[in-house]
Image (cartoon, rainbow, N blue to C red):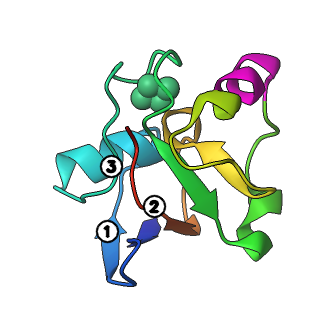
Amino acid sequence: TTVHYTDAEGTVRDIEGRPGDSVMETAVRNGVPGIVAECGGSLSCATCHVFVREDCLDTLPPIEPMEDEMLYGTAVDREENSRLSCQLKLTEGMDLYVTTPETQV
Ligand code: FES
């Protein structure tokens, strides 16, 4: 179960995660920069914005209406592949590639 975080400068960090944790929690716990997560995962800050590599999108649960709404409040404009990383739970054997935006605030 691995999450590959690429920052805005192109530096890649490969982090071994625990199934059940979110992509946000995994970043915070491992000191991965680029995810602020002001609200701690309660879907009220949009500072955990990530871009998901296109071929990984299908492996994720669909965007719920509340996440969709919050994605309009991100510091860097949302794209087709935008998600809030606190809403993405790691699953067994997952191999997920995300890029963090230039800024979250
Ligand atoms: Fe606040 Fe994800 S951590 S919305």
Q: Amino acid at mark 1?
A: Ile
Q: Which residues are magenta?
A: 64-70
Residue visible at 65% across and 24% down? 70
The residue beneath circle 2 is: 100
Question: Disc 2, ligand 1: is the CB inside 8 Å?
Answer: no
Task: Tell me whether the residue at label 3 lies in contact with that at label 1, contact meaning CB atoms closer than 8 angstroms.
Answer: yes
Q: Amino acid at mark 3?
A: Thr
Left or right side of 11 for 87: right
Quote the CA–CA distance across marks 1 and 2: 14 Å
Task: Tell me whether the residue at label 3 lies in contact with that at label 2, contact meaning CB atoms closer than 8 angstroms.
Answer: no
Quote the CA–CA distance across marks 3 and 1: 8 Å
**Position in image of residue 85 (x %, y %):** 52, 43
Q: Is residue 40 visible?
A: yes
Q: Amino acid at mark 2?
A: Thr
Q: Is residue 8 magenta?
A: no
Instruction: Describe the element under mark 3 as helix, strand or loop.
Output: helix
Question: Disc 1, ligand 1: is the CB inside 8 Å?
Answer: no
Q: Is residue 91 visible?
A: no
Vertical placement of 80 versus 40: above or below? below
Which quadrant of the figure contains the C terminus? top left
The residue beneath circle 1 is: 15
Q: Which label's residue is closer to the chain start, 1 or 2? A: 1
**Position in image of residue 90 (x %, y %):** 52, 49
Residue visible at 77% across and 60% down? 57
Instruction: Describe the element under mark 2 as helix, strand or loop.
Output: loop
Residue visible at 53% across and 19% down? 43
Quarter of the view holding residue 3: bottom left
Vertical placement of 95 versus 70: above or below? below
Q: Nearer the viewer, residue 103 or 31?
A: 103
| Residue 26 numbered tag | 3
Q: Is residue 66 magenta?
A: yes
Vertical placement of 97 versus 18: above or below? below
